[in-house]
Image: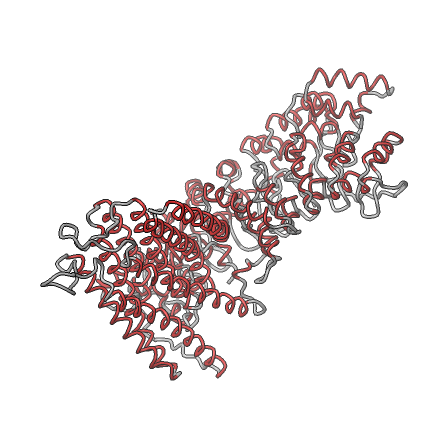
Amino acid sequence: MDLDLYKATIKGDVDHFIETLLRVSADKHLSLSSVFDQTTPLANSYLHVAAKERGLVVEYLIRYGGEVSFVANNEGKSPFYLAAESGRVDLVELMLQICIHEGYYSNCEDIKGKSPVNAAIRRRNKGSEGYYEGVQSLLDKSSECVLERDGNGFLPVHTASGKGHLDILQKLLQRCPDWRELLTNEGENILHVAARNGKSNVIDYILKTPEHEKLLNERDDSGNTPLHLAAIHWNPKVVSSLTRDKRINLELVNGDGMTALDAAEERMDMRVSFRKRLTWMALKSAGAPNGKCSKVPKLITQTSLGYQQPNMENYKDRINTLLLVATLVATVTYAAGFTMPGGYNNSDSNQGMATMLNKSKFQIFVICDTIAMFSSMIVAVSLIWAQLGDLNLILTSLRLALPLLGLALSMMSLAFMAGVYLVVSKLTWLANVVLIMGIVFLSILLVLFIPLFFPDTTTFPVIRHIAYYFFCLMIVKWKPGVKNMLRVLDDSVDFTITGDVLRILWEKDQSSFNLRCDEGRNALHFSASVGFLDGVKFLLSNFCAATYQRDLCGFFPIHTASSEGHVDIIQGMLQHCPDSRELLTLQGQNIFHVAVKSGNDKAVSSMLKMPELEKLLNEKDDEGNTPLHLATICGHPRIVSDLTWDERVNLELGNKDGLTVLDIAEEYVETMASFRKRLTWMALRIAGAPRSHTNVSNTKKTSSAGQNAELENYKDKVNVVLLVATLVATVTFTAGFTVPGGYNNSDPDQGTATMLAKLKFQEFVICDTIAMYSSIIVTVTLICTQLGDLSSMHVALKLVVPLLAIALAMMSIAFMAGLYVVVSKVSWLGNIILVMGSNAVIVLAALFVPLCFLGSSNYRIFRQLSYFPFRLLLYAFGSYTKRDESEH
């Protein structure tokens, strides 16, 4: 292929292209058709190159060299296929018109796959030596050496890229007219090689050079993009550079169906190196997703026998440590709320009020101490939830607890800095030292904490951007087959055929719409699968028969749409083919069954609002299971809740085994049942779902080993609750004598509390007393269970968990009331204390009420009252993605 003509093709200027074409033809004594037949090493013709660009040269080539429109390159793609793949309706129509008119139209089904490239080594490779002058001399002597491969299949450009020799790489690229198509034997381009070897200088150069843009998302023979290789080979700086470039597609998957994040997580373990963790953090901070069809079990949700137990033990230790830290923070900030910096006033007008009340630093102290106390309290309660033992619940609790614990520690540090500054402010140099040290250490704390929890807990770009800059600080510290016209990349769905292209194809070749893939799917299956509404409408209008064709799994297109949660597709199909709602899978399941099994609660909720689907709600499949039965079996608590509270759903229906939905739920709930199953059972109990008349016993014999494991589990729970209760008892006992406002020093009230007549002070005393005695009862009860009897532990926990909830709630209210009473002279500050305290108490109640009372009442009024905290609980813990559920 001629270099000048290649450049003219990319440039897209028709006049310049024609001028260059005529000159090349004359200089080399070639006919125009012979020039058009020239190809690159990947068998790309000039029309291939032009079809990838946006210039007008492509139209000229189609008109005057259109015979190559259906000639495939080494990837099996013709210019026609590239035009259809990119949605270029104008080019598709032009190619079809001209090619059919000229009589050389061919079917894309005949395209074959890639052919291997075998290159022999004839010369030495100097690219790896890094000597610019040597490479320059070699290039001057023979330009052919730029296409010579070494024993690894590397061309000089790949070697220079892998070694990070940017100056040599630039010179080599100038000598390679088709450098974008120069690949290794594994199909890697220069960006792949640089990403694999962590050469950030080469990466930065390529990212800043516009003509290299097409390399950014290209795949090698294994389907890996440069980002995949950087993640697989743990190069955090490269990963960070790539993910921050908006042109990089973070959602692309490789041949194994993995995104870059999947590829990184697959290779991580519990004791992963810091370098690997930095790489993972770079992906998470950029918002890189997990693949929808990834075959990689997420590290933290692995449930195979080889990984489950070590993960549980590691997380158990981690939770206990965090719980201890959170409890200590809560107790010390609680005490600090009444041990005011500067003490209390003794004068009559402001007696009992904080001395420094009007100082801005004091107000900062109060606000930060309050936030720290309530945040750490919520952390402690959420980690108590994790003691249920379900791995997914543990992870959800950690995702909530880590940011709040980071907030609590930060606010505690800020409160300490403000409080100490306040009492030493008369000595300026000392106050400034306190401020500087506080700011420095608070910054260090943020650098350590923000990347730890934000990348994994948020999808908000602003927060990810904040996390990115803290992540950069950490990096600085660390050194170290066959395709047809309808199936355009159907597996990865990188491109979607537009409705106009479908129309053109229908007009030219209707027979291609009868083609099926290896799974037996037709065009309507694929359109429904990816949510391509325009394509579905076109196919329903022109090829309605596809609605009634099964794939090899027994799914009709409407089942595919239901499984993927595309409600708009379902509505479109029902409008064109109302009887499609009656179509069943090979298991006798309707679209409601399929939607429920997929776990897409939003889709199910939308389908419940469609009157035409009402008769499907209570239909049974071949096993006698209704959609509600399947939701219970699969453990989808939010869907179970939506169905049970719909009056049209019959809760009393049994399946072939005579089991109602509640029977099934209770059959699956064991001592260590997953939290998802517990939520499902709760949803049924709250809705008043009955048991069958033939109450099926699910009593199971357990081995001694199983009983020992259960005993150890209960011991851990008892010890955790005992620790929390003891700390609550000690701090509330102390607070009873370190009263807010201090004591009177004058007769006749000497020794009595200064704020005794205040309503909020009385509230403080009552709540502190309840908290103290409740926690004492919890402590004593749990001490009695240390004898090791399993039944006594079970009964004791049912008693003490509500009491501990009361103790923590009363402790929170006491803190709010006590702090308010000493700052009430500054109304805005007092109001902030009340708002934060009230919200924290509501959150604590929402977390504890379901834990203590859900599903325990046979009275409808109590069940209805339980519904609202249960929905809040579902919002916090019950929404698992399809990916999470597939791992169980």
Residue 11 in percent (x, y) is at 69, 23
Residue 503 visible in the current orientation: yes
Q: Residue at x 26, y 51 (%)?
A: 833
Residue 79 in percent (x, y) is at 69, 31
Q: Residue at x 88, y 41 (%)?
A: 124
Q: Closest to the observer: 266 or 604?
A: 266
Q: Closest to the observer: 844 or 769?
A: 769
Question: Left of 533 or right of it: where is 262?
Answer: right
Residue 683 in percent (x, y) is at 34, 62
Residue 454 visible in the current orientation: no
Seen from this angle, which residue lies furthest left? 748
Q: Is residue 718 above or below residue 53?
A: below
Q: Quadrant of the N terminus?
A: top right
Q: Closest to the observer: 95 or 728?
A: 728
Q: Is residue 177 above or below residue 456?
A: above
Quadrant of the rendered structure where residue 47 is? top right
Colour scheme of the picture: secondary structure
* Badge count: 0
Quadrant of the rendered structure where residue 781 is? bottom left
Q: Closest to the observer: 136 or 158?
A: 136
Question: Left of 303 or right of it: where is 652?
Answer: left
Quadrant of the rendered structure where residue 69 is? top right
Residue 752 in percent (x, y) is at 15, 64
